[in-house]
Amino acid sequence: MNIAQTERIIDADIAEVWDKVCFYEEVKARPNWFLRWTLPLPVRTVGDHKTVGTLCRCEYGDGQYIMKRITKSAHNAALEFSVTEASEQFQRHLALKGGSIHLTRLSGSQTLVSMATSYEPKGSESTLRRLLVDLVIRSMHRFVMRDMADSIRHARKAQPANC
């Protein structure tokens, strides 16, 4: 099994970051050209993504979907899921197995976010193919983490000043 992993430090307390943890399919911003070119366009997630045992249906604009079962949800620490089903078209080239988002409190009010996605290629495995798949997955991770950080900044701006 292959694992693509990405890390980012977000300038926010771990509780603020936990409140913004989400899946790729929940990000409201339009994906960049690279993600639109390599992945189906995300539409939404149906289901509570922070409750263990919940089955979430992640939907895409062309009728594709992924079913994710939440396997771990530790408040302010970790979210893990397994992929239980995916549309045939979605898994044509690889089988998604699961993923995780782990948070680590750093000094000050910074949080290290670590995202990982596990997958198995279908067909012949090559170094180039693995590098390309990892590039796409890490780009998706960065997109989600950027949205988390942006959401925190926007929420802070919207809060009234304490006088």
Image (tube, rainbow, N blue to C red):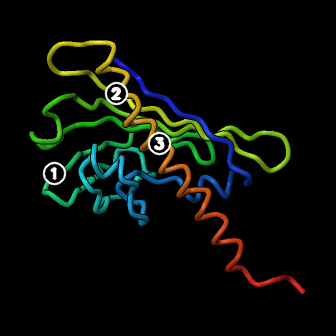
> What number is the disc on residue 141?
3
Classify 27 as above or below 102: below
Q: Is residue 73 left or right of residue 65?
A: right
Question: Toward which corner of the image does residue 53 lie, by quadrant?
Answer: top left
Question: How many dots with numbers?
Answer: 3
Crowding at dot 2, Cα within 10 Å, few <14 / some 14-19 / many 20+, comes out as: few
Pointers 3 and 2 in contact (CB under 8 A)?
no
- Quadrant occupied by the N terminus: top left
Residue at the (28%, 62%) spot, across then down:
43
Label 3 sits on what residue type?
A: His
Disc 3 to disc 2, how far (Cα)?
Answer: 14 Å
Q: Is residue 64 left or right of residue 50?
A: left
Residue located beneath label 2 in the image? 132
Classify 28 as above or below 99: below
Which residue occupies the foreground of this view, 32 or 142? 32
Q: Estimate the x, y position of residue 93 in percent, counting from the top left.
A: 17, 29
Element carrying mark 3: helix
Pointers 1 and 3 in contact (CB under 8 A)?
no
Residue at the (27%, 48%) spot, across then down:
37
Classify 119 as above or below 35: above
Of the two numbered discs 1 and 3 on the same chain, state the one appearing first in sequence: 1
**Residue that protrudes farthest toward the front in the picture:** 33
Which residue occupies the foreground of this view, 99 or 38? 38
Element carrying mark 1: loop
Residue at the (38%, 22%) spot, across then down:
131
> What number is the disc on residue 36?
none
